[in-house]
Amino acid sequence: MVSKLRVWLSHENVSKDLLLLLTIGGLYSLGIFLSSTFVNIYLWKQSNSYIDIALYNLAIYVLQPLTFILAGKCAKRMDRVIVLRTGVTVLSLFFLTVLLVGEKAATFNIMLGALLGIGYGFYWLAYNVLTFEITEPDTRDFFNGFLGVLQSLGGMTGPLLAGYIISRLNNFTGYTVIFTISFGLFIIAVLVSFGLSRRKAKGNFSFRRVVTERKNNSNWKRILSAHISQGFREGTFLFAVSIWIFLMTNDELSLGVFNLVYSGFSFLFYFLVSRWVKPSRRKKAIFISGLALYLSVLILLISDTLSLLLIYAGIAGIFFPMFYVPYISLTYDVIGKSWNAAEMRIEYIVVREIFLNLGRVLSIIIFLLAITLIPPETGIPYILLLVGGGHFFVYFFVRGVDTKYTYSSHN
């Protein structure tokens, strides 16, 4: 099977482990895109409570960075493949739990969020580390490009298929079907992981040392501040937009169409931006895309038809790639030139994740405070306007980053 895949992909030097890691990434993307958007809607239909949805997401963003720390320690002490398998197993347990609690899921919102956060933490820490270890300089572009294609295809087909299934079946039956499919996909991913070669652990986990590196390295400090700003938008937007669209259309299929338009534009522009945006233009691209994403919030707020919502989806699909491609490259450039980067890459990934989730947690706390003081229908537009500037303000943190400067700090 692996040899056939190599021929199909026209890459004779692609290793078996790389193809298996791509397969796991593809199964993960489809499983998550199929269901993650609709878990929020599932909980909403049960409780009609913004607070329940916000607490579910808050639990995800609190447990995810804490798990990253634990997973980082594990990755330095045990086989990385076991860490990855743990993440995929916990994610499959999340969907199994949703199926078991069924129409009482909203009562277990914090437990479900915590379970998902733990799964994300183990999975992404191990997947990022394995990507570094399994890919070589001559296969890295192929791997990232092909994984991007799989993620985009999952983003286009998953929510649309889920929306179609849910809208065609009565009550909560459709939700049961898509959560069952996601559970099955993660079980397959666990089985595929047994084909990966063992990866021996080495080194000590120096988490605190990398956190305090901010005092010595102004580039690292700026990047971490930028990640708080990025998370400030994402925390609320990752769940509030899907609820907003559902309330406006009262139709899961419309939410699937929204995701199809967004992912379709994303798919095209991730491909184009990687060719357009050269290192010298990174900061300019971050500024333009951050401003466009902030202004697009106004379209979201005045939308009273699906057509306007799809225009917002298209704009987001164009400018998110223009923002993330240079921003992620800039982040890795800074990490690559920071203290002891080769040995401490796990720690740098963990610390970056913690600061990103600090922003997400702060965003949801503001959301929770606001909706307890102001009626949600009145308050949510103002909250979206406040937190929606997160990506725009990233530019003001990264504009001072000097990528030509290699920092050398003292132990």
Image (cartoon, rainbow, N blue to C red):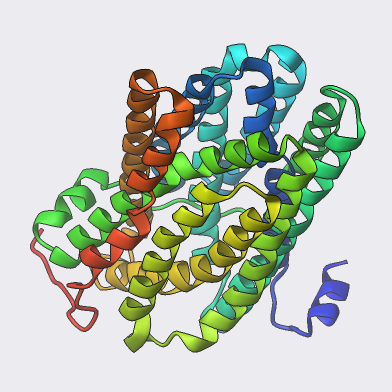
Please report the residue visible at 45 percent of the width from the left and 84 percent of the height from the top: 277
Percent position (x, y) of residue 263? 66, 62
Q: Which corner quadrant of the image does residue 344 belong to?
A: bottom left
- Image position of 51 with respect to 79: above or below: above
Q: Position of residue 238 (x, y in %)?
A: 52, 43
Q: Quadrant of residue 293?
A: bottom left
Check the picture and name the quadrant holding the N terminus. bottom right
Residue 339 in sight from this viewpoint? no
Q: Position of residue 149 (x, y in %)?
A: 69, 69
Q: Report the quarter where the C terminus lies.
A: bottom left
For this rendering, which residue is in front, 262 or 270?
262
Q: How many marks?
A: 0
Rendered residue at 51%/56% (across/down): 299
- Taking depth in this image into account, of 244 and 391 the one nearest to the observer is 244
Residue closest to the eye, 311 or 51? 311
Please say if 247 is above or below 325.
above
Query: Residue 16's quadrant in the figure?
Result: bottom right
**28 to 275, vertically: above or below:** above
Would you say 235 lies left or right of 171 here?
left
Looking at the image, residue 241 sits to the left or right of residue 92; the answer is left
* Residue visible at 51% across and 53% down in the picture: 200
Q: In the displayed structure, would residue 257 be above or below residue 373?
A: below
Q: Position of residue 71 (x, y in %)?
A: 45, 40
Residue 218 visible in the displayed image: yes
Q: Is residue 168 left or right of residue 71?
A: right
